[in-house]
Image (spheres, grey):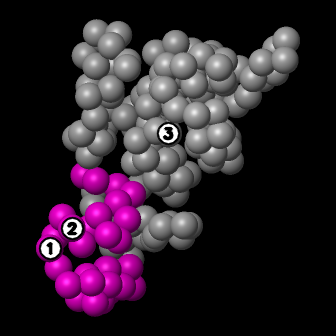
Amino acid sequence: MARFPGKYLRELQRDLTMAMGSLEYHLATLASAGLITVLEGPQKRFFAADIDRRLKPVLALLRQSLARRAVIRLLADGAVSKSALVGALGVPTSTLNHYLRQLQRAAVVDVEHKDREAVYRLRDPPTVEALVVAYRASFLDRVLDAFLEGTGALR
């Protein structure tokens, strides 16, 4: 779990090919021993206990492809309008809105309204970049790989 923070129960089950009951028992045992922590939400996400509690919601969001793609775009471009994000990511505005609200609630992005357009920027780019670099292997994402390799191919 230290290398793949924020995996949810079904991901763990698929990766470990364990029966659900057995997996839940072992996760509960690890949590009781203080070796892992659980972030409750629509999906329970599991983390090694030594990960900073403030980073867990950020890592949970980075495990979601669209949220991660939006964050990578913001890392690459700085401030980005919602319409530019919609165009770059190729998703409906309503879908993007959902993820942007989650990123705002987790204090990952801030929004500023300029001339009737919402403009988003990362609140703490160095921390977010450190997280995507540190956990790059857990995301297996060509968009992230392109950003980190400096090719600029973010689509």
Three-letter amino acid code at the position of disc 1: Thr
| Residue, disc 3 | 67
Which quarter of the figure has residue 45?
bottom left
Is the residue marked by circle 3 packed among few (<14), some (14-19), or many (20+) residues within 10 Å? many
Q: Is residue 7 visible?
A: yes
Residue at the location (58% across, 34% down)? 92
Mark 3 touching mark 1, by CB under 8 A? no
Residue 102 in picture, x, y percent from top left: 62, 47
Distance of mark 3 from mark 2, alpha carbons? 22 Å
Q: Which residue is mark 2?
A: 14
Q: Amino acid at mark 2?
A: Arg
Say which of 67 and 126 sits in front: 67
Report if residue 115 lies within the magenta region. Answer: no
Q: Is residue 13 magenta?
A: yes
Residue annotated with mark 1? 17
Relative placement, left or right, of 124 versus 43 is right
Specify the farthest residue to the right. Answer: 115
Taking the spot 28% from the left edge, 90% from the top edge, the residue there is 21
| Residues shaded magenta | 3-32
